[in-house]
Structures are given as structure tokens and as C-alpha cells.
Amino acid sequence: MTDAAITIRALNKHFGDYHALRDIDLGVRQGETLVICGPSGSGKSTLIRCINGLEAYSSGVVEVLGLQVGDNTQILDRVRKRVGMVFQNFNLFPHMTVLENCVLPQIRALGRERGAARLEAMAQLTAMHVETHAGKYPDQISGGQQQRVALARALCLKPEIMLFDEPTSALDPEMISEVLDVIQDLARADMTIVCVTHEMGFARAVADRVILMAEGRIVEEGTPDQIFTNPQHPITRDFIGAIHS
Amino acid sequence: MAETMPDTLIGAMAPPVIRSGPAAWLRKHFFATWYDAVFSVLFAVLIVWVLQALLQWTVIDAIWRVENRDLCTREAGACWAVIESRGRLILFGLYPFDEQWRSTLACLAIIVTIALSCLPAFWSFKRLPALWIAGFGIFVLLMRGGFAGLPLVTSEQWGGLSLTLFIFSGVVVIGMPLAVLFALARRSSLPVIAKSFGFFIDIVRSLPLLALLFAAAVVVPLLLPDALAGNKLMRVVVAFAIFFAAYQAEIIRAGLQSIPNGQGEAAVALGMPYWSRVIDILLPQAFRNTLPSTINQAVITFKETSIVTIIGFFEVMASGNAAIGNGEWGNQYVEVYVFLALIYFVFVFGLSRYGAWLEQRMRLGHD
Ligand SMILES: Nc1ncnc2c1ncn2[C@@H]1O[C@H](COP(=O)(O)OP(=O)(O)OP(=O)(O)O)[C@@H](O)[C@H]1O
Ligand SMILES: [Mg+2]
């Protein structure tokens, strides 16, 4: 399991004049769980969005599962079918039931039959412990449940890599663990995971590696222990201190 | 909205003791202060007086049958005899008298088609087009005839209510997909497309509808060969549809803009293709967000259909004018207009109620 799942080299991203990502080099191995943290505006979301082509980059190389993420829409399509993503705000489709949220993408992205898609959807919803809400609409269930539905929806496509952008930041504190628990299960099952989060307990429990970003750069990289108990870089120290307090 | 008093005022003036029951309710809403009481009494008297006068005119003093038409004087009540005598002219226009049953059936076919397409069960890309092709097909076959012993009636002779409904539904059925197309094109990531459609929409919106319909009826046949120009009614409906689409496109665009970016992004991240993102994710939410404006646009369009009179079509309004125009019933124009107003009211009010029902249904989440 040492094949590279994601390889990023000399990645730069500009928003107009603003230099959001500066010379990022990063590799993620198959089955690895990588946690990204860092202060607001440091470019974490931008980086993770470059991996599945939600954001176009200015220069550099992004290679995912051997495919070059770039302008080629056919390749982008293939990448997106193999890379799942979960957002801070869930982004469930409000006009569809929970079940339909999980069924429709399978039909549209993979061309699956509706019957097979329903079976898969129910299996994933069950794995996320939200199968009893299949017939409800997203605004009828709690935030924690919505996020688990969003995860089930992504997993229905059988992705090889999962991207999480602050999956628990929009949740009430009592719902955070129910979401982190299912992500943890996923990590234990050897899914390749890139997760932006500030949940240190979670990072310690599941991360193989933590990177810390500031001002568009990766400023520190190491095991959770190294980063959280013995940070080297001054920005890391400030940041760890801030989320501890 | 207009009949409710501002809550703050009532709240401030209301007595501290809250009692229930009709008396307390009346007191709270109509007699909270002395000037409330004065206005309430004044309006009550006014309303009773108006209602009584209306009832007197429309029912009690009314003359109903053509036999009694000599009794129709200025002093008498409504002379509904005019409707008995001219009703068919109003409803069918110049359509041949003996064939008017066909117009009735065609009218019913369109009404049934409209009603069915209002049901969410029919909202699919297979059912809706199939339904409208069938609806328009039956309409045109019945109205036009020319087969199986049915005499041919060309569209110049179509008229009355069935023509109004045909124009209205034709405009909406052609105009709505066009509007979606215009809205998407205006949001295109290719600046050339976005700019040119924006320009086109703005031009159409700044032209008077009448000018557009005139151009379609009179100018287009001069420019195009006969085979391409089609018949006049078709051209007018298409021009009207483009006009409708220009306005509706802006409504849809506003609806698309109100959808959070995350919706489209989630769909992209899930690998859903462009057409599916538009059809499954964005458009349903855009329509849902703009339902009141969309219904409003349909209502305006229904009322505007009467403008086709000017280019020689006898829709229901023109037929009404014809019914009083020949002198015999010239004094009964009020009755005829009341009758016309009722016809419009049935459809427009139906549309508004439908809009309210849809909104309610969507608020409950059941799409
Ligand atoms: N679409 C955009 N246009 C212009 N600037 C942008 C855009 N998206 C992000 N930025 C800028 O890029 C920088 C990095 O943004 P990014 O969202 O990646 O930060 P982040 O680390 O995810 O922050 P947070 O913790 O607040 O989510 C920010 O300064 C932001 O203002
Ligand atoms: Mg972010």
C-alpha cells in the first residue's frame, strides 16, 4: 500500500492578485489519512478543492490516482467519480428526499439502474445509521444526520479517496462525535482520506500525518504527536495554542 | 394585506385583559379605539349598501330571457338576455355556427391538458412533452377539421375562448423552455454567448409587445419564403412566446442566482454531468424560489392575450366587443364586460390559487 494516491508538485493558485497557494508539494499514499489544519484563510479549502478540480490552479502538477487533474473535462469526470467530497455545509439537495439524494448521483454519474442504486443507497445509509430517515427531506433531520447522509451519498459512488472540508465545523457540539466516528470507521477501513479539521482528538486518533498551513504554504508536517505536542514552527505553536484554549 | 391593521398599533391600544370569544375578537379588531369604531361602522354601512345594490342589479331586477328583452331599460337591472343571445358569439367568435361543438371539445382538451400539466406527477421530460403534443394535436385536429367529413375551418376563423386558451398555452409551452435556454445562455461561462443573449433579452424586453406581434404577422412573411413563414397564428404565438421568454428568463436567472454555490459544487464533486446539474439540481430549486413571480408572469400573459385582436384575431375579448358592436345589444356593454371579466377571473384566479397551493406544497418539502 505504498502507491501514491495523490501527488502535488509546485502547486500555485492565484485569485486575481491574491496568491492563495504558494509552491505546495504534497504526496498522499493509498490508505493514508492526512489531516490539514491551519488558521482561517491559509488556503486549506483551496488546496483540497484543487484535488478534485473544483478549483482550477495557476501552475504546478496535481495527479490523482494516476490522472492529471487539469483542464481536460473528460479526465476531470473520471477523477470526480473516484474521489468523494464532503463539505462543511453538507450541501444536500433540499428538494429531494434523503434516499433520492443518494440515488440520483449514482444514476447520473455512473449510469446505474435505479433498483441497484436504491439498494446501494440503503446499504450506505444503514452504514451511517441514518436509514430510518431515508424518506425525509434534508431540512427535517439534524445537522449531524445531514452530514452522515452527505457522507453516505459520496460513498455510494464507491470512491477511492475521500476529501473532507471541515466536516464538523457547522455542527452543534453534541453532534460532532457522531460524524467523526463514522469518518474514523472509514479511516480504519483503509480509505484514503484528506481531511481539513481542527478536531485534535480526532486527528490524534486517526491521522497518519498532519500538515499545518499558513498563508498559502505548508509550514509544518509530521505525525499528530509531533505537531500537537511538540510544534516547531512559531505559527504552528500559536495556532495549536489557540485551538487548545 | 391591506385589510389587516398594523399589529403594533393594535398591540399598543389593546386592553390588558385578554378575553376570548367572538365579542372579544370583534372588539380587538374593529372597536379597539373610538376611531376604529367609527371607521368600522362606516365601512360596514358602505359594504352592506354596495352588496345590496349589486344583488339588486345582478339578480333581483335582472332580465334573464331574450323573450323579455323589451323590459331591458336603463332603470331595470342587468340585462342577461344579451348573454343568452350573444353568448355563443362571445365564446366562439367567427367559428362556423354548426361546428361550434368542435370548438367546445377543443377548449375542453386544452383545459384538461393545462390541468394535467399542473400536477407534479406529470413533471417529467417524457410526460410533459407527450401530454402537450397530444393536447395541441387534439386541439388542432378538432378546430381545423378537414378530415372524416369534418369541414375545414382555417385558423383565421378560429375565435373566442378556445383561441384565447390556445394562444396562452402555446405561449407558455413554447416560452418556458426558451426562457430556461435564455437564462442558461445568459449565465454561460463563454462571454460571447452570455453577452449576446443578454443583449437580445434586453432588446426584446424594451420593444412593445404589439410591435413584436405586428412584425411577426406582417413583416416576417415579406422576408421569408411562404414555406418557412408558416401561418399567421403560428407566427404570432412564437413571437409572443419569445416576448414571454425574455421576461421569464430574467425571473429564472434570479432564481438560479439565489441558489448557494455549494449546490452546484456538490453535484460537480459527485461527478454529475452538466445537463443533470441543471435539470435535476439547479432548475427545480430556481423554479421553486421564483414561483410567485412565475405565476405572476403567467397571469400577465393570460391577460395580454387580448392584444392579438389588433392583428385580426377574434379571441374572447374581441368577440365580446363584436357582440355589442352591431347596435342590437349596444346598450348592454356592461353585462357583456361583466361576463368577460368572469371568464378571465375563473382562469386567473385559478392560476393564483394553483400558485398558492404549489408554494404550500413545496414549503412542506414534498416536491
Ligand atoms: N473565490 C475566491 N475569490 C477570491 N479569493 C478567494 C476565493 N476563495 C478563497 N479566496 C481567498 O483565498 C484565501 C484562502 O481561502 P481558503 O478558503 O482556502 O482558506 P481556508 O484555509 O479554507 O480558510 P477557512 O478556515 O476560513 O475555511 C483566503 O484569503 C480567501 O479570501
Ligand atoms: Mg475553508
Image (cartoon, grey):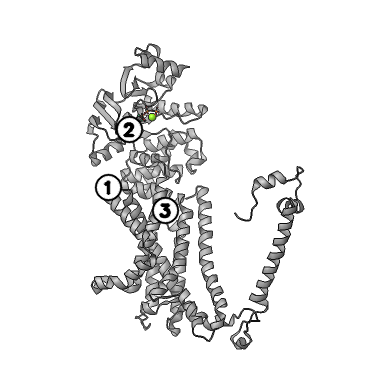
Q: Is residue B360 left or right of residue A216?
A: right
Q: Is residue B48 above or below residue A59?
A: below
Q: Chain of mark 1?
A: B
Q: Could you tell me how many numbered marks the image carries?
A: 3
The residue at which mark 2 appears reads as A49
| Mark 2 C-beta to ligand 1 under 8 Å | yes
Q: Nearer the viewer, mark 3 or mark 2?
A: 3
Numbered tag placed on residue A143 in the rendering? none
Residue appearing at x 39%, y 50% in the figure: B253
Could you tell me if the residues under marks 1 and 3 are in contact, i.e. CB atoms within 8 Å?
no
> Callout 2: residue from which chain?
A
- Nearer to us of marks 2 and 1 is 1
Q: Chain of mark 3?
A: B
Residue at the (33%, 72%) spot, across then down: B217
Q: As displayed, is residue A223 above or below residue B278? A: above
Element type at mark 3: helix
Quarter residue A22 falls in: top left
Residue beneath label 1, please?
A: B191
Quick one: label 1 or label 3, which is nearer the N terminus?
1
Q: Is residue B129 in view from this perspective? A: no
Q: Which residue is mark 3?
A: B251
Q: As shown in the figure, which amino acid type bears the numbered disc 2?
A: Arg
Q: Position of residue A232 (x, y in %)?
A: 34, 12
